[in-house]
Image: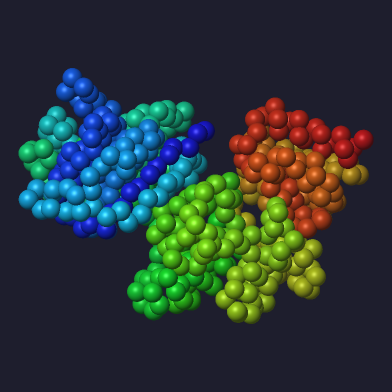
């Protein structure tokens, strides 16, 4: 799926929220023969009834312009012909550009949820306002707002040329008491809320009515510590966490205790652990030291961010390095305890690596249990693993193969260990474990380069594909190739 281009222009000029319409008017007036995307009016003065691709905002009390899709191209007219001396009502202002940041955002439906804030949201028109007031309970009103928010997300997607195959799920998790707000001279009910949805949305876009004038602005909600309690943010180490497993959760617990660190966790999985999930945070903390922990790089960073950017990983082209946990310990100049050393060994070399540290059977069992739990393995997944082994396991002297009933493979691996070679797969992914991994790394070099296949764990480690990177027929071909290689 193509990514949506976004461009955020921030100014040093502070404005009030009620000055956003004046700011919009000033930009349109100062831009010679402004493109219709600046004002959403056609040449015949009719209104362009489509999602605004140029939106005027107040971000951190300062004027800003957010552009999407075609709007990122049209905004060039602003820089080429705009007079930066403008009038905001009776106030004369010389606009000063603070920053221009470009991003590419993958807007799509995911298996998990993303949390957002929305401010100055105007979901109600004259017709649905009456229905809203007739709803007797808070729960029914919230359900109605969730339906409207879902419709707003679908309208946004349509406006940038996207149509979803699956169902958009939206849950409002916190709703502030509404207030009356003027919009185009009419009093409307405005809401501030927090919500979760399975759609990944770019920061600072608008949803609902009045999005071109800063209404319904959406920002990703993330976990953060109080950054004012010790050093300024530019003196902090900011850790961006990747897909959840026991190693990642152990890193989080270590970093959270440090006053000189800030940890940000989007609760990602291995298959969606992308650097772009933190694009807004990277921009916000670009003066700090940024550490991306096991995040696939799908985001082009600014020069300022690159100067302070560090990648922590031990997979693919970084597979020769110590575990990510050990790298973090080195950065923070701390010594790992017994449990943490076993976690690091487990992640870099599975059970054999823990045995090198003379781990007892009970220690191995407990580390593996905690790792499966951190990966989101449920009791149902554990039961499906047993059923998969019972009915789908194919054994030869050189290779064991299991078609799994669950997308969680670790319960199968743990139950079958020790094995020489193990291949586990579903209709959308496959994973090979054991001897010969390096040979398969060479075989799938092109797919690894495209980030469709990943590997780690040393010579007897693992290699497998990103979920959904290949269709069912391609998965079957890969499985047959590996089967033929070792069963010949």
Viewer can see residue 424: no
* Up/down of 305 relative to 22, above or below: below
Q: Quadrant of residue 210?
A: top left
Q: Quadrant of residue 369?
A: bottom right
Is residue 315 found left or right of 271 in the rendered image?
right
Image spot of residue 360 (x, y percent): 76, 71
* Up/down of 207 relative to 10, above or below: above
Q: Quadrant of the C terminus?
A: top right
Q: How many marks?
A: 0
Q: Residue at x 71, y 54 (%)?
A: 317
Q: Residue at x 51, y 65 (%)?
A: 308
Q: Nearer the viewer, residue 96 or 203?
A: 96
* Up/down of 402 relative to 288, above or below: above
Is residue 479 found left or right of 219 in the rendered image?
right
Is residue 388 found left or right of 287 in the rendered image?
right
Image spot of residue 101 (x, y percent): 40, 50
Image spot of residue 353 (x, y percent): 77, 65
Is residue 89 found left or right of 278 in the rendered image?
left
Q: Nearer the viewer, residue 460 or 283?
A: 283
Viewer can see residue 251: yes
Q: Nearer the viewer, residue 35 or 275?
A: 35
């Amino acid at each position: 799926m193509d990514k949506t281009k976004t461009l955020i222009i921030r100014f040093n000029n502070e404005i009030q929220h009620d000055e956003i319409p004046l700011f919009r008017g000033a930009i349109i007036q100062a831009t010679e023969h402004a493109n219709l995307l600046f004002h959403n009016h056609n040449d015949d003065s009719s209104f362009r009834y489509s999602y605004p691709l140029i939106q005027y905002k107040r971000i951190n009390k300062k004027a800003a312009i957010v552009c999407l899709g075609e709007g990122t191209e049209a905004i060039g007219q602003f820089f080429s012909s705009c007079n930066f001396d403008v009038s905001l009502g009776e106030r004369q202002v010389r606009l000063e550009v603070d920053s221009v940041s470009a991003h590419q955002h993958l807007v799509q439906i995911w298996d998990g949820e993303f949390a957002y804030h929305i401010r100055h949201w105007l979901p109600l028109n004259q017709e649905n306002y009456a229905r809203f007031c007739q709803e007797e309970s808070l729960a029914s009103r919230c359900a109605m707002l969730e339906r409207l928010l879902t419709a707003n997300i679908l309208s946004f997607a349509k406006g940038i040329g996207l149509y979803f195959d699956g169902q958009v799920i939206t849950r409002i998790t916190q709703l502030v008491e509404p207030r009356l707000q003027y919009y185009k001279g009419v009093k409307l009910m405005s809401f501030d809320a927090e919500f979760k949805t399975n759609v990944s949305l770019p920061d600072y876009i608008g949803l609902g009515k009045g999005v071109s004038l800063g209404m319904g602005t959406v920002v990703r909600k993330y976990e953060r510590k109080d950054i004012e309690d010790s050093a300024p943010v530019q003196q902090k180490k900011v850790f961006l966490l990747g897909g959840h497993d026991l190693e990642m959760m152990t890193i989080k617990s270590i970093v959270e205790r440090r006053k000189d660190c800030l940890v940000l966790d989007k609760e990602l999985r291995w298959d969606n652990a992308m650097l772009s999930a933190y694009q807004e945070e990277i921009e916000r903390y670009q003066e700090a030291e940024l550490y991306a922990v096991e995040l696939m790089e799908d985001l082009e960073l600014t020069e300022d961010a690159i100067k302070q950017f560090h990648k922590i990983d031990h997979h693919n082209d970084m597979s020769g390095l110590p575990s990510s946990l050990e790298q973090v310990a080195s950065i923070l100049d701390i010594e790992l305890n017994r449990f943490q050393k076993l976690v690091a060994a487990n992640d870099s070399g599975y059970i054999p690596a823990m045995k090198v540290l003379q781990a007892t059977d009970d220690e191995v069992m407990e580390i593996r249990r905690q790792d499966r739990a951190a990966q989101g393995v449920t009791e149902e997944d554990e039961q499906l693993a047993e059923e998969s082994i019972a009915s789908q396991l194919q054994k030869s002297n050189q290779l064991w193969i299991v078609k799994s009933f669950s997308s969680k493979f670790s319960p199968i691996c743990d139950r079958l260990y020790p094995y020489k070679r193990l291949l586990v797969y579903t209709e959308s992914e496959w994973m090979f474990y054991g001897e010969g991994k390096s040979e398969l790394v060479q075989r799938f070099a092109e797919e690894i380069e495209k980030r469709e296949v990943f590997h780690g764990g040393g010579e007897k480690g693992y290699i497998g594909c990103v979920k959904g990177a290949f269709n069912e027929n391609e998965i079957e071909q890969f499985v047959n190739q590996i089967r033929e290689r070792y069963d010949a």
